Image (spheres, rainbow, N blue to C red):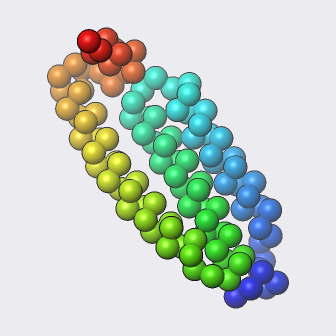
Amino acid sequence: MGHTDQIIPLNWYLVLSTFLFCIGVMGVLFRRNAIIMLMCIEIMLNAVNLLLVSFSAYSGNSDGQVFVFFIMVVAAAEVAVGLALMMSIYRNIGSTDIDVLNKLKW
């Protein structure tokens, strides 16, 4: 499947991926809840995955899809570890607010 028989142009994928990545960056920068920040990091990783898959389909080789597989594995591990840490912090402190967690510094 080459780039000539695609229904949706590559530019639309680029715009959607950029929009999703910007939403993720804004969420990480402006939200104070750690769980929401983890979700925004996942949105940024999914934006990169969409970009890699769209370029892979456009160029006709599967290298981008292999990278997406590894990114998804890393994202799953990040979610598992991050949510376990957040649950432990919430049990001990009672909040997942970043400002409250900032007080845990030495």
The one nearer the camera, 86 or 68, is 68
Which residue ends up furthest to the front in the rendered image?
106
Image-quadrant location for residue 54? bottom right
Up the image or down, 21 lies above or below 59; here it is above
Up the image or down, 39 lies above or below 106; here it is below
2 displayed left or right of 26: right
Query: What is the x, y in percent for residue 3?
Result: 78, 81
User: Which residue is painted at 77% across and 71% down in the image?
Assistant: 8
The one nearer the camera, 66 or 13, is 66
User: Which residue is painted at 55% across and 47% down in the image?
Assistant: 44
Q: Quadrant of the N terminus?
A: bottom right
102 displayed left or right of 37: left
Q: How many marks?
A: 0
Image-quadrant location for residue 33? top left
Image-quadrant location for residue 48? bottom right
User: Which residue is painted at 65% across and 41% down in the image?
Assistant: 22
69 displayed left or right of 4: left
Query: What is the x, y in percent for residue 61?
Result: 63, 82
Q: Quadrant of the C terminus?
A: top left
The one nearer the camera, 60 or 76, is 60
Query: What is the x, y in percent for residue 7?
Result: 78, 77
